[in-house]
Image (cartoon, coloured by chain):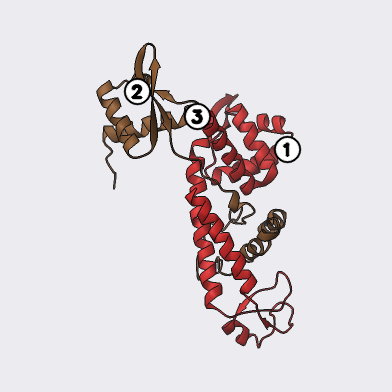
Chain colours: A red, B brown
Amino acid sequence: MGEDRLDAVSHLYTQIVGLIGGDEAIEVAEALIQLKKANEEQISSKTGLRVGDVRKILFKLYEKALITYEELKKEEGDRIKSIFLWMPLIDQVEGIATNYRRIILQKLREKLAFIEGNELYHCGKEGHKILVFDEAVENLFKCPVCGDPLFRMDKEEYLRKLKTLIKTIENEEKE
Amino acid sequence: MVRKVSRRYRLEGKVLNIIMRSKDGVVQTDLYKMLNISSREGSRICLKLESWGLIKREKVLHKERWTYKLYSTRKVPKIDSLKGSPCFACQYFNRSCSPGSAISPERCELLDKWILTIGVGGADAEVKEAVASREEA
């Protein structure tokens, strides 16, 4: 039972790390879990990634409170060299996951309220800005990016997908 | 303002932490030794945690004495439904992304992309690409 729980927590940890930093971040996190405490060079040799890339990933994960570090000061002649030993913060991951889910759900609900409460206009081209009625009037119903005419967006499909997504996240939260 | 935390409150946290970290449960009598607390205090804490639904107790015979084995009941949260969400890698998440501001969930194109492509097997790669290009910009 306990073992399952630890496995599940480790899985959740790598899952979050992957969502934040991609596949390379997963490699770094897995190396950290195995080594427990390691510096950039040790992680680099374990994963085969460049030290610079490892450092970039470590900073990203540190920013999200998924890892922490211990600073060791070493005297080298008349200079003092700092060595950073990085450690995974697996204990924190459950709180981090719950927090992300709560905030993302809140953002999706805000989006739903916005979509439901506004008439939206779009030129139909992917990546071009979606405008609300007032903005469309200001732009004389022309796309500010390409200049093509703006059409009223059919919100049905979008709303259906958004509501399904919110429901799925809410159900997962209740599990 | 500094909040004062009672000794009992701290102990409850420690007990819960030990139980949650254990691989296959903790024997209640071992817990007393680990934390150097009396059996009276330890059993009261365990009962309290059980009444809150945070732990589960199972009666076991340990070293020829009846005691309880303590397990955590807290489930590990699942985030499968959030796969592909651009918010995890977004630099504005928890910073300037809020309703009505320049970066807002209402007008977020990355969120649009995620929502619109989630039904057709998720938009993991596409969204990642879009987040990366926004970071570069």
Residue A137 tag number: none
User: Mark 1–mark 2 contact, CB under 8 Å?
Assistant: no
Task: For residue A75, say whether it is visible.
Answer: yes
Return the x and y of residue A61 as percentages of the image width and height: 58, 43
Q: CA distance from mark 1 to mark 3?
A: 36 Å
Parent chain of label 1: A
Q: Are marks 2 and 3 in contact (CB under 8 Å)?
A: no
The amino acid beneath tag 3 is Gly
The residue where tag 3 is placed is A2
Vertical order, A147 against A10 (above or below): below
Amino acid, disc 2: Leu
Query: Would you say A2 lies left or right of B83 here?
Result: left
- Does A18 sit above or below residue A143? above
Kind of element beneath mark 1 = loop
Give the residue at x 53% y 73%.
A114
Q: Nearer the viewer, residue B21 or A160?
A: A160
Mark found first going from the N terminus, 1 or 3: 3
Q: Amino acid at mark 1?
A: Arg
